[in-house]
Amino acid sequence: VQLQASGGGLVQSGGSLRLSCSASGSIFSVGVMGWYRQAPGNQRELVATITSSGGINYADSVKGRFTISRLNAKNTVYLQMNNLKPEDTAVYYCNADIIRVGLYYGTDIWGKGTQVTVSS
């Protein structure tokens, strides 16, 4: 089971990017999916999470600018980032709680990060 993220890049302040992350492998079900980010010298921090039923949580720093969504049929989570600021520059990681086929408990899976750089 793995998570594959895409969509990072370089954008000017005020611009937009859309990240996507898909889970693949021997999956029975996917619970909470989310995005985290880590800037140089900082700890990894929560950006947003979404449950399988659509319950959403955002970090205060991104409320009103970022939108998380998911497509359960494709085990995919998205992060639409608008009005980006230089302080949003970080490596963004997707995360999911995944129950593998044949198991009855979930495993916390992390994808490889994707770089988002916002220039001023």
Image: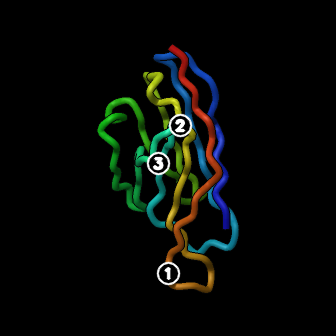
Q: Nearer the viewer, mark 2 or mark 1?
A: 2
* Res 8 → quadrant: top right
Q: Farthest residue toward the left? A: 60
Residue 12, placed above or below residue 74: above
Secondary structure of the residue carrying tag 3 is: loop
Secondary structure of the residue carrying tag 2 is: loop
Q: Earlier in the sequence, mark 2 or mark 1?
A: 2
* Res 64 → quadrant: top left
Residue 120, placed above or below residue 76: above
Secondary structure of the residue carrying tag 1 is: loop
Q: Which mark is residue 105?
A: 1
* Residue in the foreground of this view, choosing between 112 and 34: 112
Amino acid under disc 1: Tyr
Question: Mark 3 sits on what residue?
Answer: 44
Name the image quarter holding the N terminus: bottom right
Q: Residue at x 51, y 85 (%)?
A: 104
Q: CA distance from mark 2 to mark 3?
A: 10 Å
Is 93 displayed left or right of 24 in the figure?
left
| Total numbered badges shown on the rendered structure | 3
Amino acid under disc 2: Pro
Residue 105, placed above or below residue 110: below
Residue 99 at x, y percent in the picture = 55, 75
Residue 15 at x, y percent in the picture = 51, 19
Question: Mark 2 sits on what residue?
Answer: 40
Q: Residue at x 41, y 48 (%)?
A: 46
Q: CA distance from mark 2 to mark 1?
A: 33 Å
The crowding category of the residue bearing disc 2, from other C-alpha atoms within 10 Å (few below 14, some 14 to 19, many at least 20), is few
Q: Earlier in the sequence, mark 1 or mark 3?
A: 3
Is 53 displayed left or right of 111 in the figure?
left
Q: CA distance from mark 1 to mark 3?
A: 25 Å
Residue 73 at x, y percent in the picture = 57, 59
